[in-house]
Amino acid sequence: MSDAFAVGLPGYAIIFAALLCAYIIFGIAGFGTALIASPVLVLYIPIAKIVPLLALMDLCAALVNVSRDGRKADWRELRRLVPLMVVGSLIGAAILLKARPDILLLALGIFVVGYSLYSLSGLKPDRTFSPASAIPFGSVGGVFSALFGSGGFIYAIYLSGRIKDKNAMRITQTTLIGLSTLTRVVLFALAGVYLDSSLLWLALFLAPGMLLGTAIGRRLTLKMSREQFLKLINIVVLASGVALIIRYFS
């Protein structure tokens, strides 16, 4: 690898371990890799390289999961969400070009923390959303994916209130993330980001951790009850909201 990532053997071991943990969460929840991995990666890798690296690896992880379990995805929900996700992404891109979206980051963080705490409280464990709820969740998820590269937890809130089977929810979420990430990967490729051989070598080095992590996450999901699965999803969503608030004030 080039000197850009010359972090030494201990550094590579820590990066590998962080990615392994991140993709265990991805294997369970279908999102969350940036939340787990970014705080560690930023200690060793330039920030500008982290987003394209995780985008490439998330896309590969999603392809692996969809090729294995794609038949279990809820394609009705995908048909509702994907067009809205695209529209939201266009709106997010426009906001990014014309305004400072920082206040949106704080507002979303507060909403997500409040919602996940409410869900974890058990006051209303069996919440159900109508199909029309796809409009706000799909479009807002697209907006924040474009603005901050983080919309997966918004889709997770919606899908957890729509899909009863935890495996169907997991693979539907993974498919959404794969489609969302594909756009970013194409844009990075067109911009020449992936011409950096050190970035591709690092992705190749981390690929076994990604594959192992998603496999472990999938096996853990199969052993969980729906209640345990939803509790874990809400914990990851809560952590995402806290991370957004910290990001706003940092």
Image: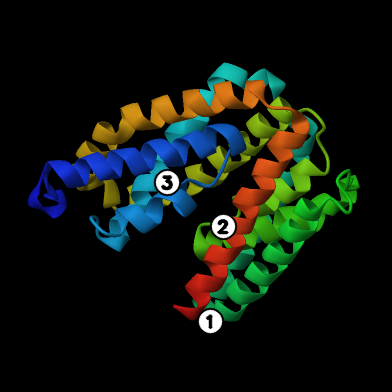
Task: Identify the image's colour scheme: rainbow, by chain, secondary structure or one colour.
Answer: rainbow
Residue drawn where x is 80% and y is 33% of the image: 76
Residue, disc 2: 145
- The crowd level at tag 3 (other Cα within 10 Å; few <14, some 14-19, many 20+) is many
Residue 218 percent across, percent down from the top left: 56, 25
**Which element type, helix, strand or loop, lies under badge 3?**
helix
Horizontally, residue 199 falls left or right of residue 171, namely left
**Which element type, helix, strand or loop, lies under badge 1?**
loop
Residue drawn where x is 73% and y is 59% of the image: 117
Residue 121 percent across, percent down from the top left: 80, 55
Q: Which mark is residue 37?
A: none
Q: Is residue 86 above or below residue 72?
A: below
* Along the line of sight, the residue nearer the viewer: 5 or 122: 122
Q: Which mark is residue 100?
A: 1
Determine the CA span between mark 3 and mark 2: 12 Å
Residue drawn where x is 80% and y is 35% of the image: 163
* Along the line of sight, the residue nearer the viewer: 245 or 108: 245
- The crowd level at tag 1 (other Cα within 10 Å; few <14, some 14-19, many 20+) is few
* Along the line of sight, the residue nearer the viewer: 94 or 59: 59
Residue, disc 3: 55
Q: Is residue 184 above or below residue 114?
A: above
